[in-house]
Image (cartoon, grey):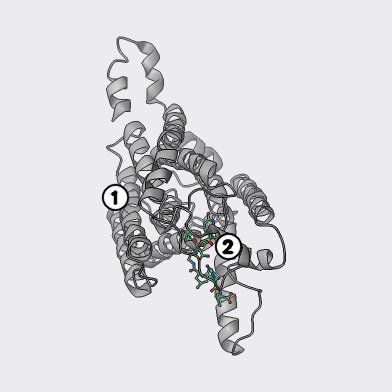
Amino acid sequence: MLYKLIYFFHIDFSVLNVFRYITFRTILSTLASLAFLFIFGTWVIGKLRAMQIGEFIRDDGPPNHIDKAGTPTMGGCLIIPVIIVSTLLWAELNNIYVWLVLFVMFCFGLIGFIDDYLKVVRRDSQGLSKKAKFSLQVLVALVVAIVLELYPGFDARLNLPFFKTITPDIGLWYIPVAIFIIVGASNAVNLTDGLDGLAIGPIIVAFASYLVFAYMAGHVKIASYLQIPYVAGAGELSVLCGAVVGAGLGFLWYNAFPAELFMGDVGSLPIGAVLGTVAVITKQELVLILVGGIFVVETLSVIFQVVYFKLTGGQRIFRMAPLHHHFELKGWPETKVTVRFWIIAVILALFSLSTFKLR
Ligand code: 57M
């Protein structure tokens, strides 16, 4: 929006030509998000406190979490609008992918909001039922998958990391695959969001990686040089990824240990779903397993724990799942778990970048 308005004057002021470039607008959207978080963060935390929107802590978790009772939550109510506004300000708005991702962000944000509202405001410990939550997530992802399948500019074939010539055409099976990636990423980020700064660190790293991937996929020369699928228009998603990185850094300011604010489901569900959607659109869906390795491992730890628990009638692999609780119960301080998970996230992201050359 703002970008178009400013660019309108580029004939009189040639310096404004710079607004044409995705790279420049990505920097602006990152900084805009960061600035919004700094401007409104303290005010929102104060409002949440005044409205008594504080975290309820389960007493079966690690003991150090009891002190976190009452920490303002539903920080996603700040993060999500900030990302949407920054994207609307600096992205090209006649781009179908930008709208598709904003649609996912809004819908998953709404699902998370209803769940948080029931749990935190209405004090209904169950929140939205697991079945309702999952069905709504699948429905939204289904809409996205169908739009992509039908959109003539989108080639719905899989792109395998390390293999440039193998691009399996799985036909209509692409729809369930895309749904799995979007819904899976959403819930994986949600499961990881259990320690101060734990989810937002790898989120920043993952979106910074996809910012680069989107730029490469949307640039015909770079895509052809790297022999990755060219997705016309996908470069605009760099602006959106930049907005998430900026909002993530701003949120980390408040979420760093000891956290003054949690993001809630209203933050974790949409951010995870958006990560999955960006991975699908940029045709880098399988690299997400690497880039989002922390989220994958956390989710697998829960699956293994639950299956093993059921098969053995009550025995456990980990002291507690998800994995971060296991390390906490082993005696690692919370910040040590968090920072080590961040380090692994950065290593995985660097490794995933190397897949573009190792082909
Ligand atoms: C989200 N939510 C956090 C906060 C955040 C199947 C099972 C593994 C599900 C899982 C679960 O419920 N996951 C959903 C986890 C919660 O954080 C809130 O939720 C939002 C994200 N959705 O934004 O609002 C707690 O996490 C802590 N936290 C921080 N800092 C942050 O920045 O310290 C969050 C953000 C907060 C706070 O304590 O209250 C959560 O962990 O509940 N369930 C679990 O994770 C439970 N695991 C479990 O039951 N394991 C069993 C199973 C698998 C057999 C086992 O291993 O034996 C654990 N969680 C809790 N207590 N709270 C263990 C018990």
Q: Is the residue at mark 1 in contact range of ligand 1, meaning its CB lies under 8 Å from it?
A: no
User: Residue 354's spot in the image, x, y percent?
Assistant: 63, 46
Q: Is residue 359 left or right of residue 76?
A: right
**Nearer to us in this view, 11 or 37:** 37
Q: Is residue 132 above or below residue 6?
A: below
* Mark found first going from the N terminus, 1 or 2: 2
Q: Is residue 231 visible?
A: no
**Nearer to us in this view, 220 or 64:** 64
Find the distance from the CA under tag 1 to the CA under tag 2: 50 Å
Q: Residue at x 31, y 51 (%)?
A: 106
Q: Is the residue at mark 2 in contact range of ligand 1, meaning its CB lies under 8 Å from it?
A: yes
User: Residue 324's spot in the image, x, y percent?
Assistant: 62, 63
Which residue is denoted by mark 2 in the rendering?
65
Q: As drawn, which residue projects farthest toward the right? A: 331
User: How dense is the environment of label 1, judged by Cα within 10 Å: few (below 14), some, or many (20 and up)?
Assistant: few
Q: Residue at x 42, y 32 (%)?
A: 32
User: Residue 248's spot in the image, x, y percent?
Assistant: 49, 43
**Nearer to us in this view, 65 or 217:** 65
For residue 67, which quarter of the picture?
bottom right
User: How dense is the environment of label 2, judged by Cα within 10 Å: few (below 14), some, or many (20 and up)?
Assistant: some
Element at label 1: loop
Foreground label between 1 and 2: 2
Q: As drawn, which residue projects farthest toward the top? A: 12
For residue 15, which quarter of the picture?
top left
Amino acid carrying label 1: it is Pro
Q: Is residue 299 visible?
A: yes
Which residue is denoted by mark 1 in the rendering?
152
Amino acid carrying label 2: it is His
User: Residue 251's spot in the image, x, y percent?
Assistant: 49, 43
